[in-house]
Image: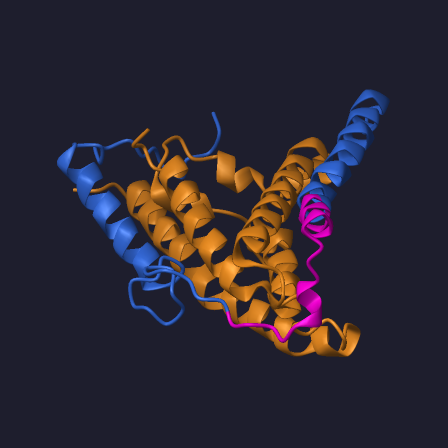
Amino acid sequence: MMSTGAVTSALLDIVCFILPKIVVAPITAYFSLRPLPLVFPNLHGAYAWVSFGWACLIIAIADDLTRYWYHRLHHEILWLWRFHRTHHSASYMGMAMASQQSILYTLFFSPTYLTAILVFAGLGPAAIAVRSVKSVITLTAHSSIP
Amino acid sequence: MAPAIKARIIRNAIASLVIYTLPVALMFGSLALAQAHPWEHLAIPHTTPHPLRPGSFFQLDRYGLVLFTLALGAVKFLLSLYDEHRRGNERAS
């Protein structure tokens, strides 16, 4: 029999696992489809000539470095820490931990928007490949399987 | 913010800008060496191998990741890694 706290925790895990997928993805799509053509009208597909390999390398580094800085600044700047401390408050490691964040942290997750801009510029297939690999790495890193 | 932390952030941010531009510089460098101008040609649609092909059910970016998560969960369960480790609302101690 699970305790009330354990039930709350399990529900939190489920919500944190599902919510980013049904909230963040539509917002990213909106961001890509609406404002980007207005702000950067000449950027659409402008770099589609970049080969798949180079595009993967560019996105992997841009995404990883942006992710690193977003995470680091949430640790080093006190007023940002409040939006990230949820992620570090669990006493166990599990796959749901990867997305257990403040909703604001998730909404403003800057690598997502950087990748959206690169997709708009024509690096879409590489973005899918890199994100697929990164998703598996992130998920596995947060699981309790070393 | 403490001056030491601020200085470290600025120093590391400058190093990061170099790392950001590195793959782009390498790409243009290799194109210059090969005297290639791919931007002058019509963009050819990329093809990616399965399971990364867009539209594939098992594409890792879509349902594939969910399936991978479920498989990983099954492994964790079989290895008895789902023991009772939760404590209340799990605030930092």
Is residue A4 positioned above or below A78 on the image? below
Residue B36 magenta: yes
Left or right for A42, reference A143 = right
Camera sees residue B21: yes
In front of the other: A120 or A45:
A45
Q: Residue at x 34, y 33 (%)?
A: B87
Is residue B46 positioned above or below B23 on the image? below
Q: Residue at x 61, y 44 (%)?
A: A61
Residue B2 magenta: no
Q: Please give the count of numbered marks on the rendered protein.
A: 0
Which colour represents chain A?
orange
In front of the other: A63 or B28:
B28
Specify the quadrant of the image occupied by residue B22.
top right
Q: Residue at x 50, y 40 (%)?
A: A87
Chain appearing in blue on the rendered image:
B
Left or right for B42, reference A17 = right
Secondary structure character of the magenta stretch overall: helix
Q: Over which residues does the magenta segment extend?
A: B26-45
Percent x, y for residue B8?
Answer: 78, 25
Is residue B67 positioned above or below B93 on the image? below
